[in-house]
Amino acid sequence: MNKKIFLSPPYQTGTELKYIREVLSSNYLAPVGEFINRFEKAVCEFTKAKYAVALSSGTAAIHLALRVIGVKEKDYVLASTFTFIGSVAPILYQNATPVFIDSDYESWNIDPSLLEIAIDDLNKKGIHPKALVLTHLYGYPAKIDEIVEICKENDIILIEDAAESLGATYKNQHTGTFGKVGIYSFNGNKIITTSGGGMAVTDDEYLAKKIRFYSTQAKEDELWYEHKEYGYNYRMSNILAAVGLSQIETIEYRIRRRREIFDIYKKLLSDVDEIEFMEELPHAYANKWLTTLTFKRSNPFEIVKKLALLNIETRPLWKPMHMQPVFKGSLAYINGVSEDLFNRGICLPSGTDLDYDDIVFIVGKLKECLSK
């Protein structure tokens, strides 16, 4: 049996241990310390966001973003349906109501025309959405210019779920920096990882301070523990921030390598007429976190099972949120795109250290599966 080929394993730079040793020697392991500040500064320098707050997860970042912009019970929040549940579960944390918006085939992200239809229809029903949580799926920017304009015209606050798209840009501006608040994830499978963690970015100093405040149990500035509001234990630890700092120092290489992996797959599979790849929009520069494709005829779920028997980890595309049992009966504006993509697509191994021979092996086994 060949070695296990993972979908998107962590890639270590070699400086993680050096920084961790510095943390251990300082004994600042908890959510305070030099490396948290350095990691936040590095993310700001890279993305050009003015403020960043390191947190325990991307989901926590979305939750805090929703809270600081004032989302509460009886509010309606628009959201991408073609995404991971961590993008939308925080809407429920605030006792608000999610409204799911489907995708288009060009971006696989929210369809701006459908978004307009949804807003108009909701307004006719007396519902004015408070916010939009927009996912940049698999590291590919959405049609952000159109979506930003729609949000402005309708007084809807934009939160960008850039969990998968750190380093992706649209017209040279980083995803996560178009909205009121943007979030990134540093989960173990992301393009950089802190094992588990996330970050909120914003150009609004007040919102950054409130996110930081709520993430540390909403403790007032007193000698004793004084609480006028409730908060959360959402702050990133100094030791995880040390790992994150080490990783972001090589972010440009990681993005370049993921894009190279996509190009190799595309070239080696160019003779398979039933395969179509997710592509980036004009003016967009994707980090191509995962190489994803769709089949015209083959069953992706069977392909995933067959490749798993060969020690090759692949995944189906995200199952849309409006199809999830937990959201049964939720408001949704659907055009069938995300359901179609889910029923036809897979994600291929895309780890930064995936070498050419591994890709050739994966492609060969995939072609065998398709030929049977």
Image (spheres, rainbow, N blue to C red):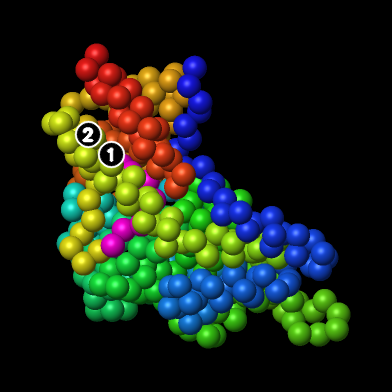
Residue 308: mark? none
Between 42 and 129, the one nearer to me in the picture: 42
Above or below — where is 47 with respect to 305? Answer: below
Mark 2 vs mark 1, CA separation in Å: 6 Å
Residue 265: mark? 1
The residue beneath circle 2 is 269
Q: Main secondary structure of the magenta part?
A: loop
Magenta residues, as a range? 285-292
| Residue 158 at x, y percent in the picture | 37, 71
| Residue 245 at x, y percent in the picture | 59, 65
Above or below — where is 360 with respect to 70? Answer: above
Name the secondary structure under disc 2: loop
The residue lying at 17 percent from left, 30 percent from top is: 272
**Do residues under tags 2 and 1 come within 8 Å of each other at their CB atoms?**
yes
- The residue type indicated by label 2 comes to Leu
Magenta-colored stretch includes residue 288: yes
Magenta-colored stretch includes residue 31: no
